[in-house]
Every structure is written in structure tokens, then in C-alpha cells.
Amino acid sequence: MKEKSFFEVVRGRRSIRAFKDTPVGKSVLERIMQVCDMTPSSGGFQSFEVYQISSKNMKEQLVGAAMDQEFISQAPLVLLFCANPVRSGYKYGERSKLFSVQDATIAAAYTQLTVQAMGLATVWVGAFNEQKVSEIARLPADQRPVAILPIGYPAEKPKDKTTRGPQDLLHVAE
């Protein structure tokens, strides 16, 4: 596989909600998890967990917990990124409570870019009932679901992306 430049990957990433039936191979999942293991994390705590949702039944339950977003059950691979605040410790006081959510978010974002670089596609699912997702995945009480990433080979051509533009994002604080 020809590697893309970082900027090509970022520029080409789109939210894809239709996937081919082609299974996502074990080596692809291993590569994704290698990247997750290298993502930046607050204090180096790696205060996040990743759950692979494999069963069709669990995927269908997630659809119900995620505002009936059917594409979740159609993806060959579904990863659930969770905050694990116990791992973030309390070295930085109250602020430490945010670190696990930040760590899970960073890992999920890097996963999106990794998936894109490997020729697959995903979409960030953040609209879900936290309690229901926790129950479906049987998460420990101290973990919090942050993002669901359905992953697979794209079965749709993405639309062009419109953005605010860099000039609208940057503000100078003096």
C-alpha cells in the first residue's frame, strides 16, 4: 500500500456512513491499536480504553442507544473509546478529571486518521445515551464512553467538505 502524506490523509478524511461487507482484517486492527498506543496522553497516563464491538447483536443494540444511527450495525468493525479516569490519577488536582476524556478523544481522532491512511473509512459517533452504551458494552462503573467509531471499507463517495476556513478559526489574544 502506498503511504499518503499526513496532509493528504487529513484533507481526504470524510465521515462515511456506508460500508462494504468486506471484513476488516486482524492486521488492520493491530495497526490501529499500535497507533492508539502511541497517541499523546495527558501526563503519559494513557487513561483511555478501547473496546471492539464484534457481535451483530451488540452492534444493533448500539444503534438503539445512538439515536438509531443504522450504519453502526452495518460496519464490519466498531470501536468504542472510553475514558478511564482512574488511570489519570490526581497529580494535577481537579483538572485531572478531564484528562481521561481528552486522552480517549485524542486516541479516537488518531484512529480516524489511521483508518483514512489505510484506505478505510469511519465516522465519529458522539450522539448516544451514555448509560445505555455503558450497559451494552458492560463497562466498569468508573469508565465513560466518549466515542463510537464504525470502521470499514467505504461504500459511498464522500461529498466535498466545507469548512469555516483558517482565517475564521484563529484569534489573536493580546
Image (cartoon, grey):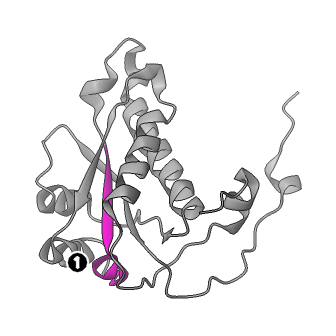
Q: Is residue 32 left or right of residue 10?
A: left
Can you give x and y, in whole percent of width and height, for residue 95 in the image? 44, 23
Query: Height in image: 153 above or below 151?
Result: below
- Seen at 52% across and 51% down, the residue is 109
- Seen at 49% across and 87% down, the residue is 155
Q: Is residue 168 left or right of residue 37?
A: right
Task: Please tell me in which quadrant of the rendered image residue 80 appears.
Answer: bottom left
Q: Is residue 70 highlighted in magenta?
A: yes
Q: Secondary structure at mark 1?
A: helix
Picture quarter with the N terminus: bottom right
Query: Height in image: 149 above or below 167?
Result: below
Task: Please tell me in which quadrant of the rendered image residue 142 appears.
Answer: top left
Q: Is 48 or 126 nearer to us in this picture? A: 48
- Seen at 47% across and 29% down, the residue is 41
Q: Which residue is denoted by mark 1 in the rendering? A: 64
Q: Which residues are magenta?
A: 69-82
- Seen at 48% across and 53% down, the residue is 111
Can you give x and y, in whole percent of width and height, for residue 119 in the image? 55, 69
Q: Is 48 or 24 nearer to us in this picture? A: 24
Can you give x and y, in whole percent of width and height, for residue 30 in the image? 36, 50
One can see residue 147 in this view: no
The disc labelled 1 sits on which kind of residue?
Gly
Q: Residues within 10 Å of mark 1 (few under 14, many from 20)?
A: some
